[in-house]
Amino acid sequence: MGGVDCHLHLSRWWPDLPVNSYGPTVDYSVRGLLRELDGAGVEVGLVIQLHQAPGADEALAEGRQLTEESRGRLRPVVTVDPTKGPSVVDATLARWEKETGIAAVKLFPGYLPFYPHDARLGPVYEFAHRRAVPVMIHQGDTMDRGGLVKYARPIEVDEVAVRYPDVRFVLCHFGNPWMEEAAELVYKNENVYADTSGLLASPTAHYFDRMIERCRRRLLNSIVTVGSPDRILYGSDWPLESIATAVGLVAGLDLPEADRAAILGGNARRLFRLDRGTPGS
């Protein structure tokens, strides 16, 4: 079986494509994304809906379209903004209840001013428990200069991981720059995972080759801290990173081949139930 990329973006509301992509030639379409996935041996991708979407209906419709156009290779990850208040959260959840293809929920602390343990998120975590879908949480640096990274430190997830032991949480971007802190949470909490998405800057950045090697060392050290590859997930953050570069980061880790294969796909297949038909049904 091919790999699984658990962290992709493909939306008409993606902010400033010429700046927020790995290069000017990126084909930002289903066809272009599938071509990159095929080139890197990745079979399935999770596409994260954006909080910039006008509303849940529009985001869900876009997700269904991407799944249909990709013939099921792209699966939707939904999102909600708790800062809009309980009525918006409740209305969004009501729409989610009618969807059978939801692979996960994604939250954007840091981009938005809330902590993962915000009380307004209780119904979201209860939905995730009821539907057995993971909750992915943005961690660390943001593309938005106006974002506040204090909301996006891994330690802030510990409280909800303990409070909701039956919900699986994914620390996106391995908590970067707090990768060791993220590793501690994965080590401590059996319901916490981490993904490898978005760990590299643009390939035009100075010292990019050195950056890859440094990032690979940090990633390997973090996996050693966890003590197992079983809750580490490959992700790219496409179009911020090319699929080939993101896969290469993991493929070059000094780990047994079986461990690299687990990170590149096997772990995500189990977590997101990708071999059980339609996720979240």
Image: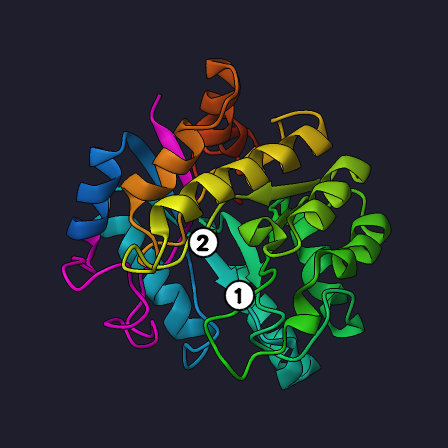
The residue labelled by disc 1 is: 79
Question: For residue 23: magenta?
Answer: yes
Membership of 190 in magenta stretch: no
Q: Magenta-highlighted stretch: main secondary structure?
A: loop
Give the total number of marks visible in the rendering. Answer: 2
- Percent across and percent down for residue 195 are 54, 44
Q: Residue at x 59, y 78 (%)?
A: 112
Relative side of 261 to 238, left or right: right
- Residue 84 image point, x, y percent: 62, 84
For residue 248, side relative to residue 28 (left or right):
right
Front-lying residue, 120 or 235: 235
Answer above or below: position of 256 versus 26. above
Residue drawn at (26%, 50%) of the image: 68
Disc number placed over residue 220 in the picture, else none: none
User: What residue appears at the point 73 percent right and 70 percent down from the top-left corner?
Assistant: 115
Which colour scheme appears in the figure?
rainbow
Q: Nearer the viewer, residue 175 or 59?
A: 175
Residue type (three-letter) at the residue carrying disc 2? Gly
Mark nearest the camera among 1 and 2 is 2
Q: Which quadrant is home to the N terminus?
A: top left
Range shown magenta? 1-30
Residue neighbourhood size for the residue with mark 2, other residues' Cα within 10 Å, grouped as few (<14), some (14–19), many (≥20): many
Residue 9 locus on image (x, y percent) = 36, 59
Give the quadrant of residue 63.
bottom left
Nearest to the observer: residue 114 or residue 30: 114
Residue type, numbered disc 1 = Thr
Residue 201 x %, y % = 39, 58
Q: From the image, tell me which residue sits under label 2.
A: 198
Residue 126 appears anywhere in the view = yes
Classify 10 Å Cα crowding around label 1: few (below 14), some (14-19), many (20 and above): many
Rendered position, 223 above or below 65: above
